[in-house]
Every structure is written in C-alpha cells, then in structure tokens.
Image (cartoon, rainbow, N blue to C red):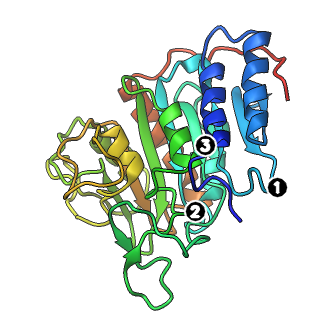
Amino acid sequence: PVWGLDPSPEANALVLSIRAAAELPLGASGASRAARLAAVAAYSLCWDAAVAALVWAPLGGERSRGGPSFALRPQLRGRGLLVECPHPIADGNGAQCGSILARADPRAVHAVLMSGHHRCVETSRATPCDGRTRVCSLGGTPLRYPLSDDAHSSTGAYHAVHVALFAPDSTVVVGLHGMDAAGVSLSDGTLLPASADSHVATFGRALGSRLPLNVTACNRGSGLPFRAHLCATTDVQGRQVNGAADSCRATGPPQRSTGRFIHVEQSSAARSHAALPALIRALEELAARAGGADAAGAMPAVVAR
C-alpha cells in the first residue's frame, strides 16, 4: 500500500514540520521541533550543507511508503521558485527534478517537491477532482484520474506539502511533466491570455533560446507560438496557486490567473540529461525576473535527524 493518498494525522504533522522549519531564525529548539514533527510521519529531516537546504525523506514502511520527498531553503523566506514533479516515475524525470537543487543558483530555488510513487499505482480508487486521462487505462479509454495522481488529487500528502511550501506573495511554482509529443508545451494553468512580460512568457523565451525545440504556450498573447496542448486546467496545484475556491472541482477552466504557476510539459528530448543545463538557466532567469532572494544565506549545521 502507498501512504499519503488520504488525509491523515501524519500528513498534518509534515505540514507542521514545514511551518516550524520556516520560522527564522531557526535555532536548535526550532530544528528539534521540526524534526520531531517529521518523525511523527515516519520522515527523516536533515540539513544538507551541499545544497544549503533542509531535506525531508520518507523512512519507508507502512507509515510513509510512497510519500513525497521535498527540500526547503527556509533562509529564502519563500522567495524564488518551488519546483514540483508530481509524476517522476511515469514521466521519467526524477533525475531531472533531483538535480535542480544542486545545479541551480541557490538563490533561485526555495523548494523542490517530488512524488514518491507512480501516478497509476492506485487505480482502484478515483479522485473526486475534475478531468479524465488515458494514461492509466489499459484499454485507452479516458477514465477519472486515480487517487494516486498527485497533480489531480487535493486530499493527499503531496498537495498538503505543496500548499505549505507555497508563499502566495513571493513564490512561483514550476510543475515539471513529461509528454509523448515533441517540443515543450507551457501554460499558467489557464487558457486565459498572458502578456509578453508574464512569468510563463519569460520562462518560455529563456528555455526556447537554449533548446533546439519548439516551445509553445496555451496562453495567447505571451509572444510564444500558441498551442492548446496539455494546458493543466485541472491541475490541483495550479488551481490552488491561481486562487480557485476549490482546487479539486470547478466548471471549466479557472477564471483568473495569478501568473505564479507554470506548467511545463516536456518531450523526452527536453527531459534528457543533455537538456538539463538549458532548463537550469531558464529557471534561474525566471527566478531573477520574479524577484528571488538576494543571498542564499546560511543555516545552523546542527539539525536533528
């Protein structure tokens, strides 16, 4: 069984652990409290000096098997990017997601969140949220998203951690996905127009200038070639960032965009190791435009494990 698909006291403890870690200055007492709360959810918490971040990892077993892994730089106070990978196994971009903290400018990325299970591992239960997919269907018939699809379920630990890591006034969320089609398809989680100086346009230009791939957008007016392909209008993290009253259910696409969510559908070439430097530079350019932190800062070396 996979942990974290349903609401639980352990998931609540993870959220409280993040909140405790985000309270600066983080002295020994605050670090100890964050670690104790992580332990309630069968997670380890340590300070990784190599990437200047606090790292939460599930210990496994029935209490946390398949739970998300995530890292936070509390010294950035929510400024910069929250990079998310809800389908690292199915999309084959786990290495890409895991490399970002180490490879990107530490002032650019304030947190990274990665799912710990396959999106199709729990097909016996469907999410109540909007949308259908063929990805987990043996016969190719569009079905309701399974509860294990972290981009389309608002009840599990992944979404709860996303909400805890997102700072509405200072964070830009970048969701990395994989697709079978060629090129890269971007959206802000809506089908609404976006200006040429929007975050989705900034990121698209930065990525397109470094990759020999066609980068398109679901948002007209961005200056990028328009293509309504995998536009993430039912993505629950996108809906939350865009201020939807209900991240799970809505009629039609979200009615507004905050501009702080970028959905990135990548071809296999865009997800390759050779393309990683281009992605890193584009993320850094986006963070600089979005007003990332001025300095990476430092954290106490003593953090309870």
Which is in the foreground here, disc 3 or disc 2? 3
Mark 1 highlights which residue?
A: 61
Q: Amino acid at mark 3?
A: Ile
Taking 287 as reference, is 23 left or right?
right
Q: Is residue 51 above or below residue 98?
A: above
- In terms of depth relative to the viewer, which is nearer, 68 or 76? 68
Taking 208 as reference, is 46 left or right?
right
Q: CA distance from mark 1 to mark 3?
A: 27 Å
Q: Is residue 48 visible?
A: no
Mark 3 highlights which residue?
A: 100
Q: Earlier in the sequence, mark 3 or mark 2?
A: 3
Residue 208: % across, % down: 36, 52
Q: Mark 3: few, some, or many residues within 10 Å (few <14, many ≥20)?
A: many
Q: How many marks?
A: 3
Residue 119: % across, % down: 56, 66
Considering every residue shown, the one lying at the far bottom of the view is: 139
Q: Earlier in the sequence, mark 2 or mark 1?
A: 1
Tag shown at residue 272:
2
Q: Quadrant of the N terminus?
A: bottom right
Q: CA distance from mark 3 to mark 2?
A: 13 Å
Mark 2 residue element? loop
Q: Mark 2: few, some, or many residues within 10 Å (few <14, many ≥20)?
A: some
Residue 232: % across, % down: 33, 57
Mark 3 residue element? helix
